[in-house]
Amino acid sequence: MNPSTPRIRTARAEDAAAIADIYNHGILGRQATFETRLRSAADVGAGIAAAAEWPLLVAEAGDGQLLGWAGVSAYRPRECYAGIGDFSIYLAPAARGRGLGTVLLQALVDAARERGLWKLVSRIFPENAASRALCRRCGFREVGTYEKHGRLDGRWRDVVIVERLVPENLQTAAPAARSA
């Protein structure tokens, strides 16, 4: 591996603080999530513990610094949705605009495929052009808009719904992942 090429790997417990820091940049930027409460390493720890069931990947620089993370969680608790994952991806500010998001999101799609998921979905603020372009590059399609989906800083916000099928898993009887 080229030392300047980030390594994509499964998140480990010791990554919790760096993942929280990257996520907190997204929270503070108000362009990627409705969340307003900053996260601690302890908050992130539960997601890392669940990574055996739901993929949680990190992009790591040659020096060990985390540049981004991407994860999947349960879409809905009903059994009929067990093969659908709700995904998130966040990059450190200094890592944006270099193609890392494409590598990380494609790795997440591959990890979802390996776990038997048949679809990934998410929601993106309409003005978040970078995230929308990233999703298009990775084979996601925009399927609609939820109007006034939530309030952020006292203002109603719409979100664009994106999805990507994992066709190899559409014929499986039961997904490897379970609903939450």
Image: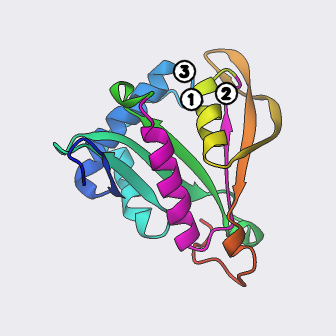
Residue displayed at 70% across by 15% down: 155
Query: How would you rate the neighbour count of disc 3 (Cα within 10 Å): few for under 14, some for 14-19, many for 20 or more?
Result: some
Label at residue 30: 3
Which element carries disc 3, helix, strand or loop? loop
Tell me if 83 is positioned left or right of 110 in this view. right
Which element carries disc 2, helix, strand or loop? loop
Relative depth, front residue between 41 and 64: 64
Label at residue 60: none
Which element carries disc 1, helix, strand or loop? loop
Q: Is residue 118 above or below residue 132?
A: below
Q: Give the mark, 2 or 1, whose residue is nearer the N terminus.
A: 1
> Does residue 112 show up magenta in the picture?
yes
Q: Quadrant of residue 68?
A: top left
**Residue 16: x, y in percent?**
30, 47
What quarter of the picture does the C terminus occupy?
bottom right
**Residue 32: x, y in percent?**
56, 29
Q: Residue furthest left?
A: 63
Q: Are marks 1 and 3 in contact (CB under 8 Å)?
A: yes
Relative depth, front residue between 24 and 63: 63
| Residue that numbered label 2 is attached to | 125
Residue displayed at 47% across by 40% down: 101
Q: Give the mark, 2 or 3, whose residue is nearer the N terminus.
A: 3
| Amino acid on which the number 1 mark rests in the picture | Ala
> Does residue 21 show up magenta in the picture?
no
Residue displayed at 67% across by 40% down: 136
Q: Which residues are magenta?
A: 98-126
Tell me if 18 is positioned left or right of 32 in this view. left
Tell me if 30 is positioned left or right of 147 in this view. left
Q: Residue furthest top?
A: 154
Q: Is residue 83 above or below residue 74?
A: below
Q: Are marks 2 and 1 in contact (CB under 8 Å)?
A: yes
Label at residue 32: 1
